């Protein structure tokens, strides 16, 4: 194992911890920006350091196609190749096949897909996924799992869960750098509590350095989403990090952290920036809107980022979708917002004021008190009293 996970503070199920990885000592809860091709779109690595990014995520599938894992290895690993001194996580490549290509035929051997380069069939096995990730050299590497959208039901979900457990053993056996890279297993099982439970138990028996909750953020209803997270976090070991894959909405991160999750990744903050949308405490601000054309305020007056200190909404409005600079500035602000949210979650848990933080967060986002029912239900299970920021149902229309 190449990590240390030390819980520094708790509030019921929520925890703030220090996660020591080979390249960086991280504070959780934490958000990881996604850098598909070894770059976070629109930001330099020094800007990522300056806004407090601790771990970035690289996509194995894209990196293996270009510039290839062999070349990255030859040039000293991805950290050196992209000049990123802090921690890094790579995914297994499985999700891309399912999401990007019409292609994926999943068998016991692995995932067969059409090469986007020359159309030839290619096979990604658990062994090869780990081999590629060993060459790339990230601090955390993910097991190849059998990915199924949560919106699918029936025997396919069960098949994928059991296959994920069989494949984890192949991943463990293929992993050649366990003292430098941490292999995380991924809990699958769709929305079925029985299957999730079998998967959690199987993975915990294998005593891995950390665990991810997979197969969510794919269109399931929010009530099912939080219940799966609550079930998995309750059953996973206290002394290991828990990573909810693909989660990037600020509200979801606050809820999952209250339920005991530690790590998150998503393209949402940078993708939404490219469409002209900024993340703010009230929710979102659409900079393309005509009302922004002569608005001289910063995106968020309470934000300390370089963009909010130096530029007006009017200026960004004039750039958005017309000039690359617009999406760069918004990406910078949105990632700053997410990383600041992570820091605030961490410090509020450590300082024993987490419930107050959650209430303040919800009050800004839902000033009328119309907090969604799924959030209220999740907070009740998390043992956090949010009655002060929830309007009674009858007066929610006022």
Image (cartoon, rainbow, N blue to C red):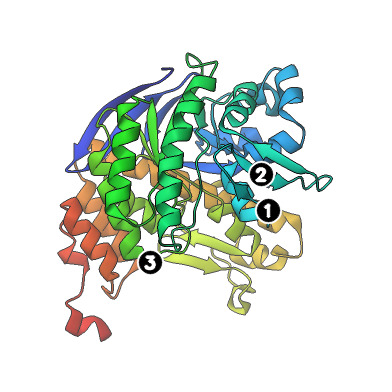
Residue of label 2: 112
Query: Gap in Å between the C-alphas at discs 2 and 3?
Result: 30 Å
Residue nearest the viewer, comparing 294 with 48: 48
Against 254, is 368 above or below? below
Residue linked to disc 3: 221
Residue at horizontal 62 percent and vertical 64 percent from the top: 276
Q: Secondary structure at mark 2?
A: strand
Which residue is located at x 45 percent, y 63 percent? 151
Question: Residue, x 32% and y 49% (percent of image)?
Answer: 195
User: Is 312 placed above or below 13 here?
Assistant: below
Rendered location of residue 189, percent (x, y): 38, 50
Q: Position of residue 325 (x, y in %)?
A: 72, 54
Q: Which mark is residue 103?
A: 1
Contact between labelled residues 2 and 1, with CB atoms less than 8 Å apart: yes
For the question of whether residue 308 can be seen, the reply is no
Q: Nearer the viewer, mark 2 or mark 3?
A: 2
């Amino acid at each position: 194992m190449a990590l240390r996970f030390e819980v520094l503070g708790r509030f019921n199920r929520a925890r703030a911890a220090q996660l020591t990885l080979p390249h960086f000592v991280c504070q959780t809860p934490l958000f990881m920006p996604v850098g598909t091709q070894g770059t976070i779109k629109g930001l330099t690595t020094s800007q990522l350091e300056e806004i407090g990014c601790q771990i970035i995520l690289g996509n194995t599938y894209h990196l293996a196609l270009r510039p290839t894992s062999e070349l990255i290895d030859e040039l000293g690993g991805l950290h050196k190749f992209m000049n990123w001194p802090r921690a890094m996580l790579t995914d297994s490549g499985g999700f891309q096949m399912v999401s990007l290509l019409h292609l994926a035929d999943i068998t016991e051997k692995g995932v067969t897909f059409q090469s986007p380069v020359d159309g030839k069939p290619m096979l990604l096995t658990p062994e090869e996924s780990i081999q590629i990730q060993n060459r790339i050299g990230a601090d955390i590497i993910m097991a190849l799992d059998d990915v199924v959208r949560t919106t699918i039901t029936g025997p396919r979900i069960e098949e994928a869960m059991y296959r994920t457990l069989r494949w984890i053993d192949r991943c463990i056996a293929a992993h050649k750098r366990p003292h430098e890279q941490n292999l995380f297993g991924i809990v699958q099982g769709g929305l079925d509590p029985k299957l999730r439970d079998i998967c959690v138990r199987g993975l915990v028996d294998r005593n891995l350095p950390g665990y991810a909750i997979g197969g969510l953020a794919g269109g399931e209803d929010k009530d099912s989403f939080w219940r799966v997270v609550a079930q998995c976090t309750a059953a996973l070991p206290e002394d290991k990090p828990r990573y909810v894959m693909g989660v990037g909405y600020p509200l979801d991160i606050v809820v999952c952290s209250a339920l005991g999750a530690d790590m998150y990744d998503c393209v949402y903050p940078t993708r939404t920036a490219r469409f002209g949308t900024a993340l703010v405490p009230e929710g979102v601000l659409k900079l393309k809107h005509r009302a922004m054309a002569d608005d001289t305020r910063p995106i968020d007056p309470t934000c300390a980022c370089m963009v909010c200190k130096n530029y007006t909404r009017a200026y960004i409005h004039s750039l958005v979708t017309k000039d690359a600079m617009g999406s760069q500035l918004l990406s910078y602000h949105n990632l700053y917002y997410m990383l600041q949210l992570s820091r605030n979650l961490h410090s509020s848990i450590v300082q024993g004021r987490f419930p107050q933080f959650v209430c303040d967060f919800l009050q800004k986002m839902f000033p009328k008190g119309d907090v969604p029912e799924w959030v209220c239900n999740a907070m009740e299970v998390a043992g956090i009293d949010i009655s002060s920021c929830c309007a009674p149902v009858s007066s929610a229309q006022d």
